[in-house]
Image: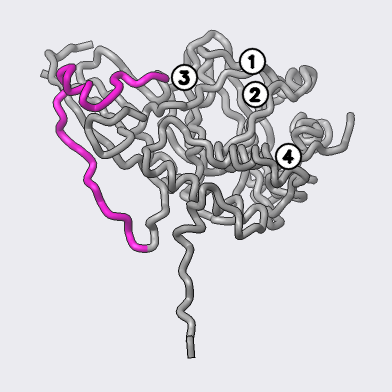
Amino acid sequence: MRQQVLVLYLVTSAIDSEVVGWSRYDGTGRTSPTTGDSDEPPYPTGLAAMQDGWRLFQAAQLLPPQPGHEYDVSFLKHEFFFEKWEEGFRP
Amino acid sequence: MPTSKQLLTSVQVARFVAQGFLRLDAVVPQEINRRAIATLTEGLPNVPYGTPLGGAFAEDVFVHELLALPVVAGAVQSLVGPGPTVDHHAVHVREPHGGQAQPLHADAIIDVRPDAFDIQLMYYPHEVTAKMGGTLSVPGSHLRRINETDIGRVQNLRGQTRLTCPAGTVILVHHGIWHGGRRNDTARRRYMYKLRLNPTVPQVRLWDTSDLHDPAVNAELETYFPWYEQAAARLEIYNRVLLWRALTGDDSFDVEYWVTRVSNRPALRSHA
């Protein structure tokens, strides 16, 4: 079995909110997703990915801003990791 | 060759503050483009850090002519002022069917100066088609505080730009913009020349400010981008307002009251 990982960045911390960013990592070796390879997200929301069989295994914690840095912007906050397990493929 | 400079308008500079880049399509004449490709093939000599731009390039090198174009000279002066220094320059070549996409990154190291910025001039001497893997960039990412490739996990963002452009295009980007080179899937070499410039004067009202109070300035500064989280989008506007205040010297400027509201701290007064 090989793991496929889908990372979705959502517009709020709610899993059923809209996707604003996405990444794919394919442990089966069948595909080679990379930076800047698509302009449209694979799913409209995080929930839509779950409905298509992706299993959520990590969600970004909700952390209060550090004192003095309340207005800073940095990494996208609402990051959700999903996985699928598939039969392995030897390229 | 005309030597006058075409300064940017306030609306154009506001767009730069909001988007983190300014795009000048097909502004370089084909004759310079041809000579540039030949020079980039051979390579350019190193320029020591901090060299004044005025003396950095011999008159017979294409970079000198490129920077003398009124539209380019005016844009550079509008953003970093007169007499900038060369940070470094580089020739980026993507071989036919070669190279892997770079991870998303910002250049150099994390750089959070609130009242100063460097620009990077990116020059494309030939047409860049979709399959040539033109630079990926993320509009409105330049004020996000990240260090170099720490953002590399992120592959795609809604509203990202996968550059296609006509020959002779120049793009001026804020030092913080998220970007990355992409794989070239054609049989043609892809060239890009990059020049980073450091300001030597305060970056205050260096452009043509005759339209400073045009409502279009506010419209540019309140632009939201499709990849912003709902809450962080408001902080993006907040940070843009601070940068616009620094660039204009106007500490009362605001968009939608975002900065004014959270800065309001009436002092306790004696009623004695």
Q: Nearer the viewer, residue B14 or B185?
A: B14
**On the rendered structure, is A78 left or right of B224?**
left
Of all chains, the one bearing label 4 is: B
Query: Which label is found at residue B127?
Result: 1
Of all chains, the one bearing label 2 is: B
Circle 4 or circle 1, nearest the eye: 4
Q: Secondary structure at mark 4?
A: loop
Same chain check for tags 2 and 1: yes
Structural distance between the alpha carbons of marks 4 and 1: 27 Å
Pinpoint residue B5: horizontal percent, then vertical percent: 82, 38
Which residue matches tag 2?
B124
> Is residue B64 placed above or below A66 in the rendered structure?
above
Q: Are marks 2 and 1 in contact (CB under 8 Å)?
A: yes
**Counting other residues with Cα less than 10 Å from the Cα at mark 4, is it few (<14), some (14-19), or many (20 or more)?**
some
Structural distance between the alpha carbons of marks 4 and 2: 24 Å
Magenta residues, start to end:
A39-67
